Image (cartoon, rainbow, N blue to C red):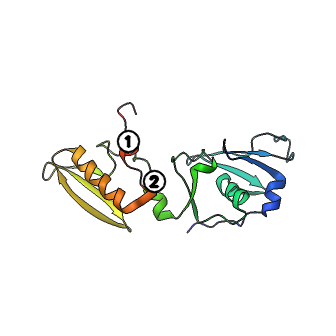
């Protein structure tokens, strides 16, 4: 489990920041240093993950965790999921409580995927497309199929039944030809 710093108080955060839940932006209420200005955007993108981070009193915090506390006046859960998988999109309706396991259900298709469909790969041994999913930290084999589309459909159905709102399947799990 990642070490999480306890955030400053709800009042302290509101003293320093304004949050616009429609744009997802945190802005400064006070001038912090020479590189900040009142009304200016707070935070910067942290690569390679792309989450927005903000430094408060020498400690770096993830902006979406600050936002959670500013909106609900409670410490954020272990993980906060960005529904659209864009870590820079901190609009309130894009954030939801999660844990590491369910947050991983909402991942985009891996860049090393060669089939173009999440959880589907070519099996040389039998000349068929294989569908699989990891559930409760264990691989679940969903079968072999004549086409990758059939394999993808089997995986999609399984995920819809088992993952609820955290499922990221369908068009989002199929890499477009342009990418």
Q: Position of residue 53 (x, y in %)?
A: 68, 50
Q: Which residue is mark 2?
A: 106
Q: Is residue 129 left or right of residue 71?
A: left
Q: Nearer the viewer, residue 106 or 43?
A: 106
Label whose residue precedes the other's in the sequence (2 or 1): 2
Q: Which residue is mark 1?
A: 171
Q: Does residue 149 sit above or below 96 in this rendering?
A: above
Say which mark, if any, is on residue 7.
Answer: none
Q: Is residue 27 left or right of residue 33?
A: left
Q: Measure the C-alpha gap from mark 2 to mark 1.
A: 13 Å
Q: Is residue 145 left or right of residue 21?
A: left
Q: Quadrant of residue 166?
A: bottom left
Q: Quadrant of the N terminus?
A: bottom right
Tally the marks: 2
| Residue 119 seen anywhere in this rendered image of the structure | yes
Q: Position of residue 103 (x, y in %)?
A: 49, 59
User: In the image, what residue occupies the spot 82% across and 60% down?
Assistant: 11
Which SS class for mark 2? loop
User: In the image, what residue occupies the spot 12% across and 52% down?
Assistant: 126
Q: Quadrant of residue 138?
A: bottom left
| Residue 57 seen anywhere in this rendered image of the structure | no
User: In the image, what residue occupies the spot 42% across and 59% down?
Assistant: 164
Q: Does residue 21 sit above or below 57 in this rendering?
A: above
Mark 1: give few (<14), some (14-19) or many (20+) Cα within 10 Å. Answer: few
Q: Position of residue 59 (x, y in %)?
A: 74, 58
Which SS class for mark 1? helix
Q: Nearer the viewer, residue 123 or 30?
A: 30
Q: Quadrant of residue 39?
A: top right
Q: Quadrant of the C terminus?
A: top left
User: In the image, what residue occupies the spot 32% across and 42% down?
Assistant: 116
């Amino acid at each position: 489990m990642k070490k999480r710093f306890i955030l400053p108080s709800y009042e302290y955060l509101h003293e320093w920041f304004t949050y616009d839940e429609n744009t997802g932006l945190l802005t400064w209420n006070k001038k912090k240093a020479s590189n900040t200005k009142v009304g200016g955007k707070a935070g910067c993108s942290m690569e390679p993950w792309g989450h927005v981070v903000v430094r408060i009193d020498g400690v770096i915090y993830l902006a979406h965790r600050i936002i959670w506390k500013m909106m609900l006046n409670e410490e954020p859960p272990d993980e906060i999921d960005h529904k659209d998988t864009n870590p820079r999109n901190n609009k309130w309706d894009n954030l939801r409580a999660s844990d590491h396991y369910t947050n991983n259900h909402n991942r985009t298709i891996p860049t090393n995927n060669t089939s173009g469909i999440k959880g589907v790969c070519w099996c040389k041994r039998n000349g068929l497309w294989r569908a699989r999913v990891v559930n409760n930290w264990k691989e679940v084999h969903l079968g072999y199929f004549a086409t990758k589309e059939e394999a993808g459909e089997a995986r999609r159905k399984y995920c819809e039944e088992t993952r609820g709102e955290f499922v990221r399947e369908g068009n989002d799990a199929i890499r477009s030809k342009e990418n």
